Image (spheres, rainbow, N blue to C red):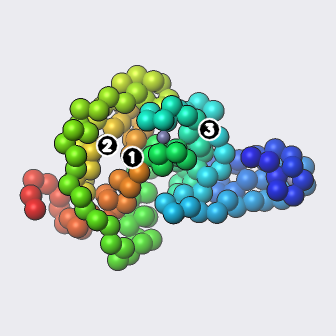
Amino acid sequence: MNCPACGAPMRLESGAESLTCDYCHSVFFPEKNDDGVRVLGASADYTCPNCRIALMDASLEGTSIRYCTRCRGMLIDMEVFAALVEVVRAGQEGAEIPQAPPDPTEIDRHLSCPHCHQAMDTHYYAGPGRVILSDCERCNVNWLDHGKLMRIAHAADALRDCGDETR
Ligand SMILES: [Zn+2]
Ligand SMILES: [Zn+2]
Ligand SMILES: [Zn+2]
């Protein structure tokens, strides 16, 4: 995006939640949206597997993610995923997230990886929330449709050892 003060293109520092203007030295913090995501700008190399539009560089609780502004899906590095779930859980204590059962037809979905464009692996997330997600082990990324990160973070069974228990 361009600098609100002078119109020059702004620069995203890696890992930062803000955009910097090299020309007038303004620093701009995009607003968080309803998902708690700050959208920072287009991410050239990544395409939404649902919408086929460019994903945006974005920030969630200080973690860099990629985000689709149309379907609000999130692409999250596997390395930071568990830590991000913890931060989201801690940051919204007591939030009520409806726990709809997973749609079993989702398991048959075929998404292609936003980065390498090969088929992603779609499966139940091994942790709490009984959420179906897709990942690409080549690129080390998880794709989560809108709302799934919240469901994992606020799952009723999140604080217990998760496993085979059915409720
Ligand atoms: Zn500027
Ligand atoms: Zn999308
Ligand atoms: Zn990939």
Amino acid marked by disc 3: Ser
Q: Is any atom of residue 138 visible in this view?
A: no
| Residue behind mark 2 | 133
Q: Which percent across, then down, holds residue 88?
A: 42, 64
Given residues 121 and 160, the one toward you in this image is: 121
Amino acid marked by disc 1: Asp
Dot 3 lies on which element?
A: strand
Residue at image coords 9%, 58%:
166
Alpha-carbon distance for marks 2 and 1?
8 Å
- Is 153 on the left-hand or right-hand side of 88? left
| Residue behind mark 1 | 145
User: What mark, if any, has residue 23 been given in the picture?
Assistant: none
Q: Hey, which quadrant is residue 76 in on the image? A: top left
Quarter of the picture holding the C terminus:
bottom left
- Mark 2 vs mark 1: give the one in front: 1
Given residues 76 and 33, the one toward you in this image is: 33
Given residues 118 and 159, the one toward you in this image is: 118
Dot 1 lies on which element?
A: loop
Residue at image coords 59%, 43%:
56
- Is 10 on the left-hand or right-hand side of 101? right
Residue at image coords 31%, 57%:
152
User: What mark, if any, has residue 43 been given in the picture?
Assistant: 3
- Check disc 3: other Cα within 10 Å, few if <14, some if 14-19, many if 20+: some
Between discs 2 and 3, the one toward the N terminus: 3
Residue at image coords 66%, 45%:
41
